[in-house]
Image: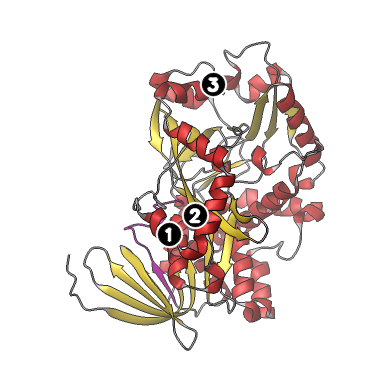
């Protein structure tokens, strides 16, 4: 490697670190809001969307809370809290509106083939879980966002929805399921690359792949000096920018620490790896056409909610089960085993220790997952697919997630399972930490980030009008406006090709 190569320097308005779904979404939105903005994208790998946004690394479910039971926890009094589910469902509708806007304006095939219709279902067994699902359905269907969700305890009906799940099942086992036909499957890798294709065609946008950011420093004038190294040549690249977004997936925490902004102090990360069982029998794949989510084991992280998942990846129908959780000290799938120890600082050591002590069941769960044999994984699959055969499935490595650990005044340190935007007080830099539901709610997250980091422009009549052009429901709650919700869903379904009763071909 040439370590003596001359460095290059440039000045832009915005630097996006990481070529994933978050940076792609933010970049496209900013260029629509202000076309003359100059943007530089820095990515440590040689292609876009190769980490958390990649189809094999990402759950691929259009997370709308239709089937994900961890978004509707049961309260101590037995009632169901649907507040998070409503927020996620709203956010996914916002995402679909923005994707529809792009597909209509630019007619790029990648922006019309990344999303497919696939029913979202929940499946449980046992009296307590059946009662929970019954209550969940009753609570959710009070909201127009979940209108049309079906509930059944009838085995014949459930067998029509998910035949492989019911074949070979104990006839005395009490079961229940819900079915939401509006569900979607999303290839976020394809979507991300489609948006970056549009960005690279716009003036004032430059991409630098194989570039690893090594330094972030705020200058006296408030701008940021970002230093990156070309991993192939060793050449140094320095970019000065008014605004920096750190959207590097699991690598965001390390980069946030490099920025040394006070708002980033005290954050830690807990990495969780994952694996899928991938079906290799075309006959089995063809007979399951749904995303079927169950209940997570006690103490398991939300990303480990088991699901039997019909997918469209690179034009092929796939069937996955999992994910099986694991532990690695890497923050990225293609990262370093030193990522976790290198992230420990004096300011976050105490929150990390406290959060670890409070989550011993989670640690025990991850250790048990790591120790699983092929027979153990098959046994877990058979809970959802009683007639599963080991020869029909092979192990596939999923993506790496870094759950957020943050300071807490009363508890010292808490482990979070959502996403968290951390930004400087002056709005000059922001980082996105965390995981699920992440990609599905990227548009809402980036709208909030823009309004926080660009407050004057975001409140201006010009930007407000452009927000409404990109997102027709901007500033309104779809849950409070059933008529608008119906209009929005009808339009997005037509443009994105979601009106069919089976997934379209291609991704």
The secondary structure that most of the magenta stretch takes on is loop
Residue 129 lies in what quarter of the image?
Answer: top right
Name above or below for residue 46 compared with residue 113: below
Which label was assigned to residue 269?
2
- Determine crowd level at label 2: few under 14, some 14-19, many 20+ residues with C-alpha closer than 10 A: many
Q: Which element type, helix, strand or loop, lies under badge 1?
A: helix
What x and y, as percent, mark residue 188?
Answer: 49, 50
Q: Determine the CA span between mark 1 and mark 3.
A: 40 Å
Residue 198 highlighted magenta (yes or no):
no
State the extent of the magenta-drawn residues as a range. Answer: 39-53
Q: Quadrant of the N terminus?
A: bottom left
Tell me which residue sits at (62%, 12%) in the image. Answer: 170
Badge 1 or badge 3: first in the primary sequence? 1
- Residue occupying the point 64% across, 48% down: 493
Q: Mark 1 points at which residue?
A: 343
On the rendered structure, is 239 left or right of 107?
Answer: left
Q: On the rendered structure, is 496 left or right of 136? A: left
Label 3 packing within 10 angstroms: few (<14), some (14-19), many (20+): many
Residue 99 percent location from the top left of the image: 57, 57
- Give whichever of discs 1 and 2 has the lower sequence position: 2
Residues under numbered marks 1 and 2 in contact, where contact means CB atoms less than 8 Å apart: yes
Give whichever of discs 2 and 3 has the lower sequence position.
2
Residue 171 visible in the shown view: yes
Alpha carbon of mark 2 to alpha carbon of mark 3: how far?
34 Å
Report the front residue among 414 and 391: 414
The residue that disc 3 covers is 385
């Amino acid at each position: 490697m040439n370590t003596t190569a001359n460095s290059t320097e440039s000045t832009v308005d915005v630097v996006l670190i990481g070529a994933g779904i978050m940076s792609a979404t933010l970049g496209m939105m900013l260029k629509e809001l202000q076309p003359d903005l100059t943007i530089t994208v820095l990515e440590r790998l040689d292609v876009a969307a190769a980490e958390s946004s990649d189809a094999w690394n990402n759950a691929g479910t259009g997370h709308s809370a239709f089937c994900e039971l961890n978004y509707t926890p049961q309260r101590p009094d037995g009632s169901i809290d649907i507040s998070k589910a409503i927020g996620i469902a709203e956010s996914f509708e916002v995402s679909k509106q923005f994707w529809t806007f792009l597909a209509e304006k630019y007619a790029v095939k990648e922006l019309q083939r990344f999303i497919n219709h696939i029913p979202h279902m929940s499946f449980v067994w046992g009296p307590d879980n059946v009662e929970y699902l019954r209550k969940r359905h009753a609570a959710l269907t009070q909201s127009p966002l979940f209108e049309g969700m079906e509930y059944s305890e009838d085995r014949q009906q459930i067998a029509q929805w998910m035949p492989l799940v019911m074949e070979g099942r104990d006839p005395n086992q009490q079961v229940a399921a819900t079915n939401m036909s509006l569900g979607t499957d999303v290839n976020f890798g394809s979507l991300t690359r489609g948006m970056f294709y549009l960005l690279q065609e716009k003036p004032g946008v430059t991409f630098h792949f194989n570039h690893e950011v090594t330094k972030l420093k705020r200058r006296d004038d408030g701008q940021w000096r970002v230093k990156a190294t070309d991993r192939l040549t060793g050449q140094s690249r320095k970019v000065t920018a008014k605004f920096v977004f750190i959207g590097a997936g699991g690598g965001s925490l390390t980069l946030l620490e490099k920025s040394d902004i006070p708002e980033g102090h005290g954050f830690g990360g807990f990495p969780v790896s994952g694996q899928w069982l991938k079906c290799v029998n075309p006959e089995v794949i063809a007979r399951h056409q749904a995303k079927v989510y169950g209940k997570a084991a006690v103490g398991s992280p939300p990303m480990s909610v088991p699901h039997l998942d019909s997918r469209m990846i690179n034009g092929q129908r796939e069937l996955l089960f999992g994910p099986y959780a694991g532990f690695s000290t890497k923050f990225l799938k293609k990262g370093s085993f030193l990522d976790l120890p290198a992230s420990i600082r004096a300011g976050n050591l105490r929150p990390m220790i406290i959060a670890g002590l409070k989550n011993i069941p989670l640690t025990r769960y991850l250790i048990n997952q790591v120790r699983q044999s092929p027979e153990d994984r098959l046994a877990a699959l058979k809970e959802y697919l009683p007639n599963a055969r080991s020869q029909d499935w092979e192990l596939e490595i999923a993506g790496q997630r870094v759950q957020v650990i943050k300071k807490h005044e009363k508890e010292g340190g808490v482990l979070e399972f959502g996403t968290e935007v951390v930004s400087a007080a002056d709005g000059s830099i922001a980082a996105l930490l965390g995981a699920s539901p992440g990609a599905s709610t990227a548009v809402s997250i980036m709208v909030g980030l823009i309004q926080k980091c660009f407050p004057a422009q975001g409140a201006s009549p010009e930007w407000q009008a452009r927000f409404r052009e990109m997102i027709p429901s901007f500033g309104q709650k779809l849950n409070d406006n059933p008529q608008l919700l119906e209009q929005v869903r009808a339009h997005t379904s037509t443009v994105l090709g979601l009106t069919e009763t089976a997934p379209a071909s291609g991704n």
